[in-house]
């Protein structure tokens, strides 16, 4: 169900997609489904997938149930889609940056994961990220200090956000999360390896399946180091050796992510993950989501190479400072 | 039919000659006049779907990224790096020795080289393009599947998807181009078009336009080596097609892996440092 509607957001799109694809909702899967096999006998996860979803990570305040009814979900999706396109009101900053509905970037116009759950978090049972540990509070304070030292967002490249700097975005993780737009992945398997290409900044995960250990703790990477294995039809991937510079909901370099990917239908991969990081949270927590089949191919996302935005905002900020200084000088000379 | 038989015979003879050379290196074997390269003597192991298995981590071992043409050793372009940044000499990887530039293009190449610290896209951590990605001093991993073959480069996390099944025209210009592939006997043949005009071939300023068309052949030559050839066409820049060739070597160490080389962070001060907010003067 790749609704390639280009005429802007419409209620019809949501209604039609809902009607056609409730069968693809995460909850609805046949226990008899047997995933196809690659030529070398692995369960076949290959192809183009998306994890775009309107389901929030944490259960919204005021919602107590774990699942919506299909009718309730429809209402929630309509509201979420409307909110997403509302940001492109003519004349707003968001409209100048991206018109989500015009270019089909908003989730309602392409494949997205429909999920009756009220939150992606399934454990703790309240659907919320667990409390921050004492060490976590210390780390957060330390980070705030560091950001203060770096200065305001447009004081330098280094003080700006990671996505504005084209360093890394939400998509590749791990854990792999909806990146707001272009939440697309290409999975390719060969003997001994699973490769996952993320559209955003062409970030790649190469996951070896041969049981090799994680490298020395001195090796630290933005995306950590992943090791995988098949447990029956489930691909289990453990990732450690993070550098902590791209915190996932506050995580540190001690983060350990355990992901479970299992193809439960031709068009659906069930995606679960557990994150553990005692340096941030008092207990591990677990998410259940999915990846839906979408159409390829994935294009080159040369983010840094075309990063006029970062350059221009820095130039703009310096010009504004210069103008303010001149105004001050003029006032004092009068 | 007869000529095919002849080539097969030559290949068999040269294979036998190779074996006898290995046994008795002092006895020079008579080489056939026809180069046997077209009929490879080595047959690679097969993947589960029956194709030559190119999976693995590969790396060039030469100085082509400094200059694909023959060049002498030279001092470091950055004084403070001393010998650690000096340029090692190389016999070149361009067949026939030099690149057939059009006169105007040759001038631009020389300007590029004179200003390479300012102009080389590698200095800014930009995507390397093709074929440069293949012989940069970083490894790359081939993940080979039936429909898609991935080439995953350590440098800048550059990625190439080679479409083996649904072959289509490049939808738009890009740094890494758009690659369609096919098997030709033992060789993977990759046809890449749809390039922008922003990448270079090396640090010496060798360059191309958006009319670049690269045809590569990856041919196994032993368990741990590949022959790599790339034919380069670009009528806006060169007077005729030309070719580079080199072996690629498998990274055989246990647990070899492509490391993260997210170099954007390493060039921010260089690229944007002059736009940093200055502390207010007191």
Image (tube, helix red, strand yellow):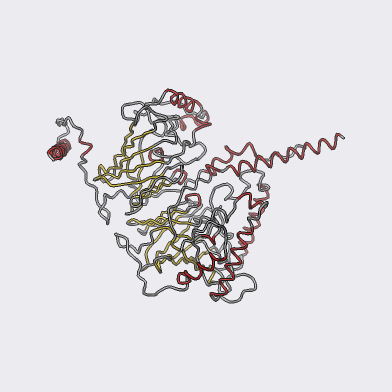
Picture residue at 50% right of the left edge, 65% below the top? A113
Q: Quarter of the image holding residue B42?
A: top left
Examine the rendered structure and indicate whether residue A12 appears above or below residue A104: below
Picture residue at 32% right of the left edge, 35% below the top? B245
Picture residue at 58% right of the left edge, 77% below the top? A65
Q: Quarter of the image holding residue A59?
A: bottom right
User: Is residue A295 shown left or right of residue B17?
Assistant: right
Q: Nearer the viewer, residue B25 or A109?
A: A109
Q: Position of residue B174 (x, y in %)?
A: 46, 42
Q: Quadrant of the C terminus of chain A?
A: top right
User: Is residue A139 shown left or right of residue B72?
Assistant: right
Marks counted in the figure total: 0
Q: Nearer the viewer, residue A178 or A6?
A: A6
Q: Nearer the viewer, residue B73 or B135?
A: B135
Residue B192 in sight here? yes
Q: Position of residue B190 (x, y in %)?
A: 34, 43
Residue A252 in sight here? no
Q: Position of residue A285 (x, y in %)?
A: 53, 68
Q: Position of residue A2 (x, y in %)?
A: 47, 61
């Amino acid at each position: 169900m790749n609704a390639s509607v280009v005429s802007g957001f419409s209620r019809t799109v949501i209604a039609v997609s809902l009607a056609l694809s409730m069968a693809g909702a995460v909850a609805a899967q046949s226990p008899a489904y047997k995933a196809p096999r690659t030529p070398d006998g692995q369960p076949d996860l290959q192809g183009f997938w998306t994890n775009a979803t309107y389901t929030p990570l944490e259960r919204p305040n005021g919602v107590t149930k774990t699942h919506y009814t299909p009718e309730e979900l429809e209402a929630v999706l309509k509201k979420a889609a409307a909110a997403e396109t509302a940001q492109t009101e003519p004349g707003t900053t968001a409209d100048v940056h991206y018109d989500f509905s015009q270019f089909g970037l908003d989730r309602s116009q392409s494949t997205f994961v429909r999920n009756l759950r009220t939150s992606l978090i399934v454990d703790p049972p309240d659907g919320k990220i667990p409390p921050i540990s004492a060490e976590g509070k210390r780390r957060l304070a330390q980070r705030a200090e560091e950001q203060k030292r770096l200065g305001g967002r447009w004081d330098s490249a280094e003080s700006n956000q990671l996505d504005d700097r084209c360093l890394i975005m939400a998509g590749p993780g791990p854990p792999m999360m909806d990146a707001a737009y272009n939440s697309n992945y290409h999975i390719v398997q060969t003997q001994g390896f699973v490769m996952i290409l993320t559209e955003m900044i062409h970030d790649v995960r190469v996951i070896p399946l041969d049981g090799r250990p994680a490298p020395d703790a001195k090796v630290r990477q933005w995306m950590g180091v992943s090791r995988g294995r098949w447990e029956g039809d489930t691909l289990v991937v453990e990732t450690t050796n993070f550098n902590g510079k791209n915190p996932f909901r506050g995580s540190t370099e001690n983060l350990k992510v355990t992901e479970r990917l299992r193809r439960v239908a031709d068009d659906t991969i069930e995606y679960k993950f557990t994150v553990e990081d005692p340096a941030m949270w008092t207990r591990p927590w677990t998410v259940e989501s999915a990846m839906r089949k979408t159409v390829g191919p994935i294009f080159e996302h040369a983010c840094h190479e075309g990063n006029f935005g970062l350059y221009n905002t820095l130039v703009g900020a310096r010009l504004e400072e210069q103008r303010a200084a001149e105004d001050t000088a003029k006032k004092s000379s009068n | 039919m007869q000529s095919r038989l002849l080539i097969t015979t030559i290949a068999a003879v040269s294979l036998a000659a190779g074996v006898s050379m290995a046994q008795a290196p002092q006895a020079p074997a008579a080489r056939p006049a026809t180069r046997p390269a077209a009929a490879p003597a080595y047959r690679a192991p097969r993947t589960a779907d029956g194709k030559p298995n190119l999976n693995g981590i590969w790396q060039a071992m030469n100085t082509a990224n400094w200059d694909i043409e023959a060049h002498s050793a030279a001092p470091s372009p950055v004084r403070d790096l001393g010998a650690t940044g000096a340029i090692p000499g190389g016999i070149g990887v361009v067949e026939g020795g030099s690149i057939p530039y059009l006169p105007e293009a040759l001038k631009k190449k020389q300007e590029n080289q004179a200003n390479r610290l300012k102009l080389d896209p590698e200095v800014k951590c930009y995507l390397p393009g093709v074929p440069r990605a293949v012989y940069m001093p970083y490894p790359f991993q081939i993940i080979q599947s039936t429909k898609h073959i991935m080439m995953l480069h350590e440098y800048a996390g550059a990625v190439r998807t080679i479409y083996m099944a649904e072959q289509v025209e490049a939808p738009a210009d890009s740094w890494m181009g758009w690659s369609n592939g096919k098997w030709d006997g033992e060789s993977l043949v990759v046809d890449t078009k749809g390039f922008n005009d922003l990448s270079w071939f090396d640090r010496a300023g060798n360059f191309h336009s958006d009319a670049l068309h690269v045809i590569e052949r990856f041919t196994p030559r032993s368990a741990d080596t590949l022959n790599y050839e790339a034919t380069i066409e670009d009528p806006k820049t060169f007077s005729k097609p030309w070719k580079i060739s080199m072996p690629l070597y498998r990274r055989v160490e246990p647990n070899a892996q492509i490391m993260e080389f997210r170099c954007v962070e390493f060039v921010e001060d260089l690229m944007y440092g002059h736009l940093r907010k200055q502390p207010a003067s007191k």
